[in-house]
Amino acid sequence: MDLNSIKEGAINIAKSVGKKTTDTVESVKVKGKVSSEEKAIKATLLEIGKFVWDRFEEGEIVSEDLIPLCETIRDHYHNIETYKKDLEDKKAGNTPEEEPEVTDSEDEE
């Protein structure tokens, strides 16, 4: 093997590494853009959900299909309040003899 062959091999390796680095950087940039778009979608979906929830709370029915979902949310809010009250009672030394009553929900997490 002569010096020129070694030199050409090193140049080819450097070019290959450079291309892979460029490809990786481009891939990371695209993934970042996709992630930003997905976050924007989630934020907008949350806004839509808040809008629907607010209408439901005001007694306006946006869609019959959404009523069960809104009722599930209401159940979760009820459970949160029950848990908070139970905690306050325990801190005050008033320990209930049984577990607090929570509302069952089909969408338990």
Image: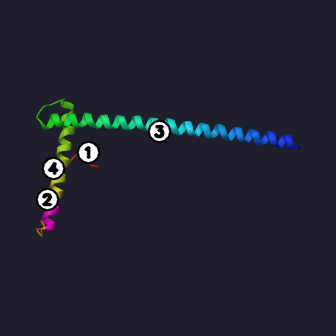
CA neighbours of label 4 inside 10 A, class few (<14), some (14 to 19), many (20+): some
Task: Give the residue type at disc 2.
Answer: Lys
Mark 1–mark 3 contact, CB under 8 Å? no
On the image, numbered disc 4 is attached to which residue?
Answer: 78
Picture quadrant where residue 53 is located: top left
Please, what secondary structure does the residue beneath circle 3 have?
helix
Cα separation between marks 1 and 3: 32 Å
On the image, numbered disc 2 is attached to which residue?
Answer: 85
> Could you say where residue 50 lies in the image, as x and y percent from the top left?
22, 37
- Image quadrant where one finds the N terminus: top right
Cα separation between marks 3 and 4: 39 Å
From which residue to which does the magenta span run?
85-91
Q: Nearer the viewer, mark 1 or mark 3?
A: 3
Please, what secondary structure does the residue beneath circle 1 have?
loop
Picture quadrant where residue 84 is located: bottom left
What number is the disc on residue 32? 3
